[in-house]
Amino acid sequence: MQIISAQQVDQVLDFPRLISALQQGFAGNFTMPPRQLLPLSPGKPEALALLPSWNERVIAVKAFSYFPDNAVQQLPALHSSILLYRRDNGVPLALVDGSSVTCWRTAAVSALASRYLARTDAKTLLLLGTGRLALPLIQAHLVEHDLQTLLLWGRNTAAAQQLRQKVQLLYPRVQVTVVSDIAPACAQADIIVAATGSATPLLFGNDIPAGCHVDLLGNHSPQQRECDSELVRRASVYVDDRNNVLNEAGELLIPMAEQQFSAESIRAELAQLCQRNLPARQSADEITLFKSVGTALSDLLCAELVLQRPYFG
């Protein structure tokens, strides 16, 4: 059984191949049982999560531990690993670093969803958040769209400026600007990606222009949300996985509690979008919203692609 590190994952992956692998994988046959989040101690946030899935080729189990107080010890809050087995006989294939895979597949899923939900002439992307996912999200969306302008917002202005400099060096043809106010930046955006983990809304429905595509991926809590109920009410809503989102995403659960939205109003899951493989947008003025909390299948497909790359023979 191979042991594949985060550095090796980063060395062999690229977004064009990964986005294509995700599209094909979500369009194909797969099984994805509900993931389990297991509290480790009553009344404490520490937890262990198990995310199983399989297709015709591979069985995968992603496990991650969550210790939010680890920052005191200067340790990451999350530690993640993915086990791969052969589907035909159960023989172990690899143990893959899960944190790196999560970063790659999250950005790739965001871009893949935008293939179906954003306007084909999208030129301006507004990104909220300057964390580890920020640069991969930009890189993935540049694969899918001929972006001319990037607007960057973050609570840490210095981090936003550092990200701007890095992106500008990598993509000199793209105009990159740090913005301090979200609302006026929304008015300029064709695509908005929120990757902040904010406990309270940063995006408000009345600020979102007609024709905009909004992607929300930073929050995993039923009590928190990155957007208000008005945006959900105005938008055509799509999700990566219905069961996971309706268990974890305050962006939809809070409007549902307010009777502003219903589960039946979800237009489709990512798998349905990939199976149809056609634009889902109904008009140029439609506001689309994609809410993701992560799926075991995307972990499997990303880890499987790593294993298939020539670097590992």
Image (cartoon, grey):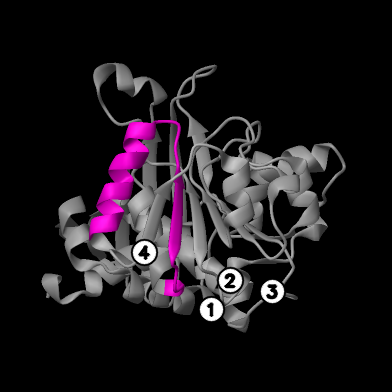
Whole-percent x and y of residue 226?
61, 40
Please report the bounds of the magenta region as a residue range.
144-169
Q: Report which residue position mark 2 lands on.
A: 271
Q: Which residue is mark 4?
A: 174
* Res. 146 visible in picture: yes
* Label located before the other in sequence (4 or 2): 4
Residue displayed at 33% across by 40% down: 161
Report if the CB atoms under discs 2 and 1 are less than 8 Å apart.
yes
Q: Which residue is mark 3?
A: 281
Q: Quick check: 41 above or below 27?
A: above
- Taking 250 as reference, is 117 above or below it? below
Return the residue nearer the eye: 68 or 60.
Answer: 68
CA–CA distance in space, label 2 to label 3 = 16 Å
- Above or below: residue 174 compared with residue 230: below
Q: Residue under circle 1? A: 27
In terms of sequence position, does the residue under pointer 2 or pointer 3 come before the other? 2
Q: Quadrant of the C terminus?
A: bottom left
In the image shown, does 195 or 126 lie closer to the viewer? 126
Judge from the rendering whether residue 296 lies leftward or rightward of residue 91; answer left or right. Answer: right
